[in-house]
């Protein structure tokens, strides 16, 4: 994959309601990652103000869906946050 190709595409963001936002949950993302579609990725604000993704788990937490390492997580976060315009400036 060239540096101009994004591994993440078809990003959609659903904003959380005010009560969830007050707890740090900003909303949910669905996207394609290569040939895989991911849904239900939570976008959260940590107590220190950083934005992070929380990846969904299967029933009972048995089949976690998550990046394979920290580098992959950072790449996916950067791509998703850029697509929904909250990486630096906060959600619209």
Image (tube, rainbow, N blue to C red):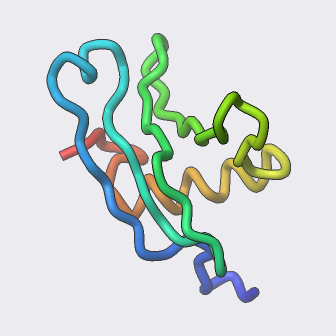
Give the farthest residue toward the front. 59
Q: Give the camera-side residue of 76 and 41.
A: 41
In the image, is residue 66 above or below residue 62? below
Relative horizontal placement of residue 71, taking residue 74 as reference (left or right): right
- Count of numbered tags: 0
Give percent across and percent down for residue 8: 56, 71
Give percent across and percent down for residue 55: 60, 41
Which residue is at 69% across, 28% downward?
60
Q: Give the camera-side residue of 11 and 85.
A: 11
Which residue is at 84% across, 47% downward?
69
Relative horizontal placement of residue 39, taking residue 33 as reference (left or right): left
In the image, is residue 85 above or below residue 90? below
Relative horizontal placement of residue 28, taking residue 4 as reference (left or right): left
Give the farthest residue toward the right. 69
Which residue is at 27% across, 21% downward?
20
Q: Give the camera-side residue of 35 and 79.
A: 35
Give percent across and percent down for residue 12: 34, 62
Which residue is at 52% across, 62% downward?
79
In the image, is residue 38 above or below residue 60? below
In the image, is residue 25 above or below residue 2? above
Relative horizontal placement of residue 25, taking residue 46 as reference (left or right): left
Q: Give the camera-side residue of 73 and 34.
A: 34
Report which quarter residue 1 is drawn in.
bottom right
């Amino acid at each position: 994959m060239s540096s101009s190709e994004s591994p993440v595409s078809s990003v959609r963001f659903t904003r959380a309601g005010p009560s969830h936002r007050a707890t740090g949950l900003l909303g949910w993302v669905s996207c394609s990652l290569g040939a895989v579609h991911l849904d239900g990725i939570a976008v959260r604000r940590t107590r220190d103000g950083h934005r992070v993704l929380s990846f969904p788990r299967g029933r009972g937490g048995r089949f976690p869906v998550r990046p394979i390492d920290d580098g992959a997580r950072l790449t996916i976060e950067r791509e998703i946050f850029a697509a929904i315009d909250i990486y630096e400036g906060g959600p619209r």
